[in-house]
Image (cartoon, helix red, strand yellow):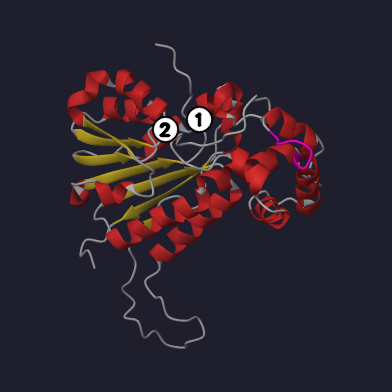
Amino acid sequence: MEIPHIPVLLNEVQEIFKNLKTGYFLDCTLGFGGHSEALLKNHPDLKFIACDQDQQALEFSKKRLKNFRNRITFMQSNFSEVLEKISHKEELRGILADIGVSSFQLDNNERGFSVNSDFLDMRMNQNSKISAYEIINTYTKEQLTSIFKDYGELHDAHFIAEKICLERSKNPIKSAKELYQIIGKGKQNHRKISKATLAFQAIRIEVNQELKVLKDFLGHLENLKPKNCILAIISFHSLEDRIVKKFFKKWSKNCICDEKIMRCECGNNHSLGQIITKKAISASKEELLKNSRSSCAKMRAFYFNNLDNK
């Protein structure tokens, strides 16, 4: 069968989880099954929980992974909610979340992710009520400015929002192509990425509430305090990577006292584990040559060794 997506950092993911033996592995963002297929082959005694909110991706992966069906439980869910839905939490030994957009989603005209699309959608879960169309055509100028500034880190966010509001006052903006023309092909100052790419990324983050979803997921993990479990997160946006880095740093601290306090008063025993990756892992030169979309990928990993389950 033709595979519509190349999994990023595949070798690096396998290296992170190479010592897993038995128990359960949670693939929070199954996508088209590339990471899970490799891990299933290399870990015959692991059982898998495979989750994705995209129905098309789930259906494809069920076919791709049919030879392992006795070891996999499939779920359709946003990854921020999956920890509340699964059983066997105490047996989780590995968790992977690849929180990027798949090549299939980007290349599929009807999904409206690409600047060349005839649609304006960008929903990862096609059952979601709000799409890019509603955001572009109904959000106020101030709301659009905030999205472009906060999520796209665009210096001229106000100007872009103003142009969109002017154009939609004439006729609704119906396609990504049209939106691309309105935003323009110029590049952000001192950055190689075009303004349109950054703006589209910001809209997608708003449509899917990606930063909130990530924070919710990490918050659930913090409350769960899994035992003897490795977590790896692959992100594609600096804001996402910043959130992951902040949570990992917090989890690794024994002392949670205010820095101004001279002497520890908290008990100095609050660490949930250790950070595995001293710095984010990026794609190798070899991978970049094969898959240019891996250029923004960054993976961080954390080991929960909270044996007392405090």
Residue 117's place in the image compared with 136, above or below, is above
Q: Which mark is residue 102?
A: 1
Q: Which mark is residue 134?
A: none
Residue 79, percent from left and from top: 38, 45
> On the picture, is 197 further left or further right than 8?
right
Q: Which residue is located at x 44 percent, y 12 percent?
A: 2
Residue 180, percent from left and from top: 74, 33
Residue 137's place in the image compared with 294, above or below, is below
Per the model, the C-alpha gap separating discs 2 and 1 is 10 Å
Secondary structure of the magenta portion, mostly? loop
Whether residue 59 is visible here, answered yes or no, is: yes
Highlighted magenta segment, given as a residue range: 168-173
Quadrant location of residue 181?
A: top right
Q: Are marks 2 and 1 in contact (CB under 8 Å)?
A: yes
Q: Which mark is residue 54?
A: 2
- The answer to whether residue 169 is magenta is yes
Quarter of the figure that contains the C terminus? bottom left
